[in-house]
């Protein structure tokens, strides 16, 4: 039986979970103000970097006494920088429910070899957050990019905690309301929710984290690109535009453009609203199609950015092959690019719903998902 494809296509078929879609108003000409061919340590470069730091503070609502730095190697570099500098002073609880969190567990147990407890949950679920002891240092991902599972709104980090909280927020920043007073280290990469260019990370330190840095020296050597202190004091220049190594000023200009776009749609509140609306469109689709479901088991933990889906139809003979075929068909049709599940995750789809994606594109893509499912089922 012939299956007719939909007539309408998304204007932008880019639903990748990183690097993510550029803001809808992006144009290369908007980056013409980048100080290319100049030292990043010259006045124009340092001014751009400081502007990026302070506009990040403005858009995200980061407290004035928190330090914000731009660092190498994307979110991975930022989070490992935090781990290598801060951990080891006390026992650590490592929380993981997807592949990136599992990577931080490996860092703690096999690379740093510190006194740590591993708490993990399978894809689609989350660890027992009520059982976390915040007298220990706690490492966790706010939103599991590869599982579509985020911490619920009920997750309560005590104000009087003795340990530090180290939060990987790379797919949560700019799409979720982060509790800054309860986060001591927060990291992200602007390639995610703002659709920036890759390779740069952001690290945000609370006063408690700065105090730890200036009072504790880890037992292991620190590479130059990880060093946040000198002579027992924070290297404050990192947090005012003097980066550890050479940044791409073109990428910084792109980030500044994305931050201004974020302000134009209502800053954090507007960004959250756009991501929620995109996710709501997928939720409505899932609720009316019995062959697909969210990977996240509990609705309270479902991401509004990295939305992960699984096929549930008993007629599917090979789940992994079927999911790849659906993703390939949608990519070949140029209606949904790069939406296959992450390589370590269960078979399925992963659709980025962050604010740089237009709801109209999600709505135009979903009938194609229905078409691709039926076409692949017919082709088995």
Image (tube, rainbow, N blue to C red):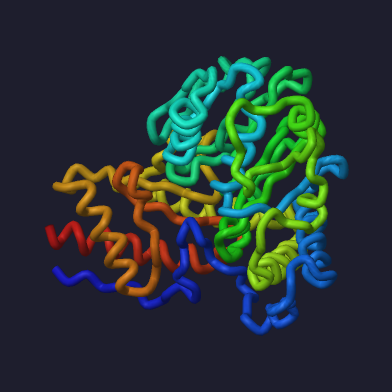
Quarter location, residue 65: top right
Taking 241 as reference, is 141 above or below it?
A: above
In the rendered structure, the answer to whether residue 31 lies left or right of residue 151 reads right
Q: Residue at x 50, y 41 (%)?
A: 144
> Is residue 316 visible in this depiction of the protein?
yes
Residue 308 image offset from top left, x and y in percent: 42, 47
In the image, taking residue 173 as reference, residue 280 lies left or right, namely left
Q: Quadrant of residue 219?
A: top right
Q: Foreground residue, 24 or 146?
A: 146
All told, the count of numbered labels is 0
Work out whether 359 lies above or below 299: below
Q: Is residue 210 above or below residue 23?
A: above
Q: Quadrant of residue 255?
A: bottom right
Residue situated furthest right in the rendering:
64
Q: Residue at x 28, y 43 (%)?
A: 312
Q: Residue at x 81, y 36 (%)?
A: 233
Quadrant in the picture for the N terminus: bottom left
Image position, residue 216 (x, y; %): 72, 25
* Observer able to see residue 298: no
Q: 242 or 345: nearer the eye? A: 242
Query: Residue 248, percent across and down?
Result: 64, 68
Q: Residue at x 72, y 33 (%)?
A: 184
Residue 261, x across and y down, in percent: 71, 68
Left or right position of 320 against 35: left
Q: Quadrant of the C terminus?
A: bottom left
């Amino acid at each position: 039986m012939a299956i007719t494809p939909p007539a309408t296509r998304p204007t932008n078929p880019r639903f990748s979970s990183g690097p993510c879609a550029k803001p809808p108003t992006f144009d290369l000409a908007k980056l013409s103000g980048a100080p290319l061919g100049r030292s990043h340590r010259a006045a124009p470069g340092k001014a751009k970097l400081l502007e990026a730091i302070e506009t990040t503070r403005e858009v995200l609502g980061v407290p004035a006494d928190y330090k914000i730095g731009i660092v190498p190697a994307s979110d991975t570099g930022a989070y490992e920088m935090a781990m290598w500098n801060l951990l080891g002073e006390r026992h650590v609880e490592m929380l993981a429910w997807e592949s990136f969190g599992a990577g931080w567990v490996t860092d703690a147990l096999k690379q740093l070899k510190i006194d740590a407890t591993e708490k993990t949950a399978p894809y689609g679920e989350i660890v027992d957050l009520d059982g976390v002891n915040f007298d220990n240092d706690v490492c966790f991902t706010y939103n599991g990019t590869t599982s579509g599972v985020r911490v619920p709104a009920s997750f309560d980090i005590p104000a009087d905690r003795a340990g530090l909280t180290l939060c990987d927020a790379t797919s949560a920043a700019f799409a979720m309301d982060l509790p800054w007073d309860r986060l001591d280290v927060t990291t992200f990469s602007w390639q995610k929710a703002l659709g920036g260019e890759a390779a740069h990370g952001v690290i945000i330190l609370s006063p408690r984290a700065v105090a730890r840095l200036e009072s504790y020296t880890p037992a292991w050597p620190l590479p130059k690109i990880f060093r946040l202190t000198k002579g027992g004091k924070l290297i404050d220049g990192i947090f005012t535009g003097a980066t550890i190594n050479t940044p791409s000023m073109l990428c910084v200009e792109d980030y500044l453009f994305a931050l201004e776009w974020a302000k134009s749609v209502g800053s954090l509140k507007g960004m959250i609203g756009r991501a929620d609306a995109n996710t709501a469109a997928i939720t409505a689709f899932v609720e009316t199609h019995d062959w697909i479901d969210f990977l996240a088991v509990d609705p309270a933990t479902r991401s509004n950015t990295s939305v992960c889906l699984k096929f549930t139809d008993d007629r599917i003979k090979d789940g992994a092959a079927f999911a790849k075929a659906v993703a390939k068909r949608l990519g070949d049709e140029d209606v949904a690019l790069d939406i296959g599940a992450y390589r370590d995750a269960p078979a399925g789809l992963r659709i980025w719903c962050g604010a740089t994606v237009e709801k109209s594109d999600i709505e135009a893509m979903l009938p194609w998902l229905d078409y691709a499912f039926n076409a692949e089922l017919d082709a088995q």
